[in-house]
Amino acid sequence: MHAQTEISFGGETLILSTLRTAYHQDSASLIISDLHLGKTTHFRKNALPIPKEAMLTDFHNLQQALNHFKPMRVFFLGDLFHSTWNEEWDLFVNLMKNYPLLQKLLIAGNHDILKPDKYEAAEMVVLDRYQLNNITLLHDAESEDCLYSISGHIHPGFKISGAGKQSMVLPCFYVGQSKMIMPAFGSLTGKMAVKKLNESDRAWCFYNNRFYPC
């Protein structure tokens, strides 16, 4: 069972989930970033012994999120697919067919290099950005000057420490004064440790379906 927490950002209410999603209830929009679908098969083709279970985990979690929140729209904030086409894209297209009324929008990222017909097959609208009320949805907001933005790209993690100098980096939603950074959805993605830029910033870390606000 996944956990949820409600936050306010940019004058909007968002529901963060340990499924690595954010839900904007007023517009019935689900926000997901950095799935990197196809990465398992890409690695296996290059003789890296990645178990297929990693691929199935991502598809299961995506389906679970869509079935739980029942959104009218889903925004993928870039890096939906990891590299050139492989069979995982067809699995994704077939999954999307189960949600014919769902509007599917991709904010293109640096890994989104498939040909336009592939996105059309998934009924995907590809954009550079999207304005969701006060918030600009982007893939990478580092060099962007927006009033408020939600982005992905860097796969944020936050270092937490315990007794005996033990520490670990947990995936997190990083929520700053004007920028919110989504955790990577894909199970094979790494994490980049982030530090708070301001005392008021929050890192909503999660592990084993529990949130650990930092």
Image (cartoon, rainbow, N blue to C red):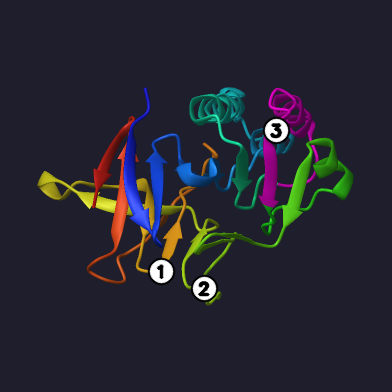
- Name the residue rendered at 62%, 47% in the picture: 76
Which SS class for mark 2?
Answer: loop
Q: Position of residue 25 (x, y in %)?
A: 46, 42
Q: On the image, which quarter does residue 56 sit in?
A: top right
* Residue located beneath label 1 in the image: 178
Q: On the image, which quarter does residue 60 sit in?
A: top right
Choose the circle earlier in sequence order: 2 or 3: 3
Question: Is 147 above or below relative to 94?
Answer: below
**The one of 166 and 203 positioned closer to us in this rendering:** 203
Question: Is 144 above or below relative to 27?
Answer: below
* Residue located beneath label 2 in the image: 146
Check whether the beta carbons of the residues at disc 3 and disc 1 lie within 8 A of each other.
no
Residue 1 — which label?
none
Residue type at mark 2: give it.
Cys
Task: Check disc 1: other Cα within 10 Å, few if <14, some if 14-19, many if 20+.
Answer: some
Check whether the beta carbons of the residues at disc 2 and disc 1 lie within 8 A of each other.
yes
The CA span between labels 3 and 1 is 37 Å
Which SS class for mark 1?
Answer: loop
**Quarter of the image where the N terminus is located:** top left
Question: Is 42 above or below relative to 79?
Answer: above
Residue 24 visible in rendering: no
Which mark lies nearer to you, 2 or 3?
2
Residue stretch rendered in magenta on the structure: 83-106
* Residue located beneath label 3 in the image: 41
